[in-house]
Amino acid sequence: MEHWGKLKRRTNEILSSAHKNMPNMPNMPSLPTPAMPKLKSGSSMKGTWQHVPLPPLPRSSHSLNVVAGSAYIFGGEVEPRKPVDNDMHIITLPFSGAPADYYNVPAKPSTKTQLVETIEPIAEELEVTEPNEPLEEVSLSSPAAREAEAPFKPEASSSDKGKTTVEVPSPRVGHATAVIGSRIFLFGGRSAASETLDEGGRVWVFETKTHTWSYLDPAPSSHVPPARSFFSAVATEKPRDFASKSARRNETWKEWAEGDSAEMGIPQRPIAGSVAASATDEEDAGYGTFIIHGGGLRDGSQARDVWAFDVRSHIWKELPPAPGVGRVGMALAIAKSRLYRFGGFDGEGELGGQLDVLELTVDEFDDNLSKGEVGVFARGDWISLIPASQEGEAGKLVADEWPGNRSVGGMELVMGGGRREYLVLLLGEKSPSGAVHEAAGQFWGDVWAFQVPPLGMSTASVKDAVWQVMGRKTGEGKWTKITPAPFDEEEDMDIEGLAKGENGIFLFGGVNEKNRRQGDGFIFRLG
């Protein structure tokens, strides 16, 4: 068992939830047990840390994402403000007794061409003519022929003019990443020259299936967020269910009667392979939304703005700014269509004392012919959840305990017992050093869990409603400090990965209180 205090470290952008990404154990037979309710009155929660043996790879200010049982590490530094490389370092996480494995992939560009969905213009006038050909040759659609759509080629922004076009991201620190599907999206950071990278709003994309890089430049009509570093990012898979496009083809009556038999065949003589030949990968067209918040700007100021990048349309849009002052190193997470923020550093000290929440919604399109999702928008403004001792202030929440002020910690969504969702807040910096980034301050070694209030009446929320009627406290909307429990390596050898239905958090690297870069990895499990 690793000592709990050994995990104290600065954790800026170095931990990633394995929710829906860690490998699952095969189904195992379960022994029948009496269906007796558990009515333990204690509100304590436990968590374990499992050390993952790996070759040393010390670094901090890097990014880490977990996709399909593998952790992807990019960028970072060993010496302050000196990026190490632009390789993608990949760790296959331990599973079912098999140990972890490590390898690195040099940066190389993808050969795919990104397409952007465009809205077709509606013709203002249609010329009506009498048919002068046989009926079977008369077209059923508009006589105006349409040219095929060309792939989208973004124009260079003013900030990009004069720069050399690159096809892979340069080495950097203080960038931020998030996962949509099997792809990792990256934005911002600082270069080897200690300058904030201004790439004209470009979002880099790492394809975990092919180990290649591509990029998405903003559409010409899009606003662009200011360049930044040491900020936070999250992502959602919405919008994903887009309106289907009906094929607009110039078909004659004869062609209409024949249908697609030339391509698909007829039931008695189907043409094999026609469906597979026309199949497309939804990730090629793109879906989801990449969200960034805060950070340090080029002029030295700190931001509190929030920007959302629509992957399909390549359009940045600004969401309501978060409350309070601008900051760096804040913890950011998405749970149940809500954006949560905690802590940060405002240039003078660590922030905390409230959990800020922004409700998100997905706009839909419906013209009675087709229906689909359009984009992610904010529903109203931010609200701040505060401790019960501050109930007279703006905001609302009751909480018996509250995490201390911190920055560069991690906050990830984890599924607990009863299908309850928890935001797990880990580690972070308690107080800065006089040299700020050049030296380490004092760090937290604690872990907290915030039970996410449900949007609807799930099984867990029904149970909690019954408990409230009985006069019992529930955990919804409150913080609980996690009690460390030992990890029994021999007993848990068969579930070194995470058991079916369970998920956790993988932590790698960071800075300890002696200002040394760490190169070790741990898996945190709740409960």
Image: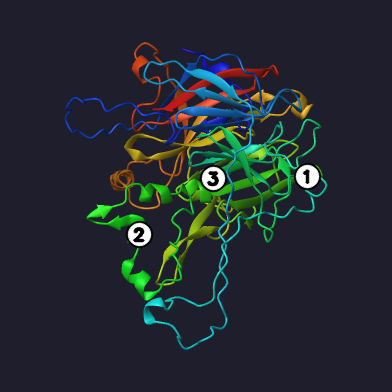
Q: Look at the image and tell me whether residue 125 can be seen.
A: yes
Determine whether the residue tagged by mark 3 lies in a helix, strand or loop: strand
- Residue 370 is left or right of residue 192, and the answer is left
Q: Is the C terminus in the top left, top right, bottom left or bottom right quadrant?
A: top left
Q: CA distance from mark 2 to mark 3?
A: 43 Å
Q: Earlier in the sequence, mark 1 or mark 3?
A: 3
Q: Which residue is mark 3?
A: 235
Q: Which mark is residue 262?
A: 2
Dot 3 alpha-carbon crowd within 10 angstroms: few under 14, some 14 to 19, many 20 or more: many
In the image, residue 245 above or below residue 151: below
Between 368 and 304, the one lying in front of the other is: 368
Residue name at image x 38 percent, y 47 percent: 276
| Residue 508 percent coordinates (x, y) | 57, 23
Query: Does 435 appear above or below 268?
Result: above
Along the viewing direction, whichever of 509 and 205 lies nearer the viewer: 205
Q: Label 2 is placed on what type of residue? A: Ala
Q: Dividing the picture into quarters, in which one does residue 184 lie?
A: top right
How many marks do you count on the picture? Answer: 3
Q: Look at label 3 and name its amino acid.
A: Ala
Residue visible at 61% across and 37% down in the picture: 213
> How would you rate the neighbour count of disc 2 (Cα within 10 Å): few for under 14, some for 14-19, many for 20 or more?
few
Whether the residues at callouts 2 and 1 have beta carbons within 8 Å, the answer is no
Q: Position of residue 302 (x, y in %)?
A: 74, 44
For residue 323, say whether it is visible.
Answer: no
**Real-space Cα distance between discs 2 and 1?**
63 Å
Q: Which mark is residue 301?
A: 1
The percent position of residue 407, horizontal first and vertical second, equals 64, 34
Viewer-nearest of labels 1 and 3? 3
